C-alpha cells in the first residue's frame, strides 16, 4: 500500500463526517442594501460650491475664459458646463461673467496701441462674442425685373447692355517646323516631322 492511498483512506472519511460550515450572512439571501436616509445623494459628491458664482464673475471680468476659470478651481471644463445646467444660479453668474469678459476685452482693445496687442484683443473679442465682433459683409442686390416675366429677346437685350465678357479661345497648336538651339558645345537640331512635347 502506498502512502497516498493510505492518506486517502484516512482523510476522506474525516472530511465526509464534518458538516460544511457557512457563514450566516453569506450565500443565504441575495445582496440587499440598507435603506438610505431621506435626502441622501447617490454617487460621487459634487465639487460645486455656491461661492463659485462670484469667483467666475471676478475671473472672467479680468478677461479670462470659462476654461481658464475651470483651471483656476481645479476642475474640467465639462464639469463647469454640467454645473451651468444643474445650478440655475451658477448659469446666471456665467452669463453675467461672459458679458463682463467682453467688457474687459473691449477696454483692453481701447487702451492698446497699434500692433500685436490690438490684433490679439480683436481676436479674443471675435471668439468671446462672435455675434458682435464677426466680419460682416453686406451686399445689396437690386432686381428691376423678374426673370419669369422676361422673354428671350428681353433677356438678350439686358445681356447686351452689360460689359462684353472676355472670350478665351483655344487655338490649335501648330507643329514646330524647325527649332535650332545653340549650346556651348554644339547645335541641337530638332526634326520637324517628330511631334515635340
Image: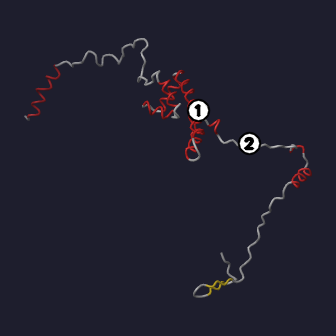
Decide which of tag 1 and tag 2 comes sooner along the chain.
Answer: 1
The extreme top residue here reads: 38
Which colour assignment does the render follow?
Answer: secondary structure
Q: How many marks?
A: 2
| Mark 2 secondary-structure assignment | loop
Label at residue 46: none
Q: Is residue 78 left or right of residue 168?
A: left
Where residue 101 appears, as percent x and y from the top left, is 55, 32
Q: Residue at x 59, y 88 (%)?
A: 186
Taking 34 as reference, is 155 above or below it? below
| Mark 1 secondary-structure assignment | helix
Q: Is residue 158 left or right of residue 130?
A: right
Taking 63 as reference, is 176 above or below it? below
* Residue matched to label 2: 138
Q: Residues within 10 Å of mark 2 (few under 14, many from 20)?
A: few
Name the quadrant of the N terminus: top left
Quadrant of the image occupied by residue 111: top right
Where residue 51 appears, as percent x and y from the top left, is 46, 22
Name the quadrant of the C terminus: bottom right
Cα–Cα gap, marks 1 and 2: 26 Å
Pick whichever, 49 or 168, lies toward us: 49
Label at residue 103: 1
* Residues tagged 1 and 2 counted as in contact (Cβ below 8 A): no
Quadrant of the image occupied by residue 17: top left
Where residue 167 appears, as percent x and y from the top left, is 80, 62
Amino acid at each position: 500500500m502506498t502512502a497516498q492511498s493510505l492518506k486517502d483512506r484516512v482523510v476522506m472519511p474525516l472530511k465526509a463526517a464534518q458538516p460544511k460550515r457557512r457563514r450566516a450572512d453569506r450565500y443565504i439571501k441575495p445582496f440587499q442594501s440598507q435603506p438610505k436616509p431621506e435626502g441622501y445623494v447617490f454617487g460621487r459628491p459634487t465639487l460645486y460650491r455656491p461661492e463659485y458664482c462670484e469667483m467666475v464673475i471676478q475671473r472672467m471680468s479680468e478677461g479670462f475664459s470659462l476654461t481658464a476659470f475651470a483651471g483656476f478651481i481645479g476642475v474640467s471644463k465639462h464639469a463647469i458646463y454640467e454645473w451651468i445646467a444643474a445650478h440655475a444660479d451658477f448659469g446666471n453668474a456665467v452669463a453675467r461673467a461672459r458679458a463682463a469678459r467682453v467688457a474687459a476685452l473691449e477696454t483692453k482693445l481701447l487702451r492698446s496701441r497699434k500692433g500685436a496687442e490690438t490684433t490679439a484683443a480683436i481676436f479674443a473679442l471675435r471668439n468671446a462674442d462672435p455675434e458682435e465682433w464677426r466680419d460682416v459683409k453686406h451686399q445689396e442686390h437690386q432686381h428691376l425685373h423678374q426673370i419669369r416675366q422676361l422673354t428671350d429677346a428681353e433677356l438678350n437685350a439686358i445681356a447686351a447692355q452689360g460689359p462684353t465678357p472676355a472670350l478665351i479661345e483655344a487655338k490649335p497648336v501648330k507643329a514646330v517646323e524647325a527649332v535650332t538651339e545653340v549650346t556651348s558645345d554644339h547645335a541641337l537640331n530638332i526634326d520637324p516631322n517628330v511631334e515635340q512635347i
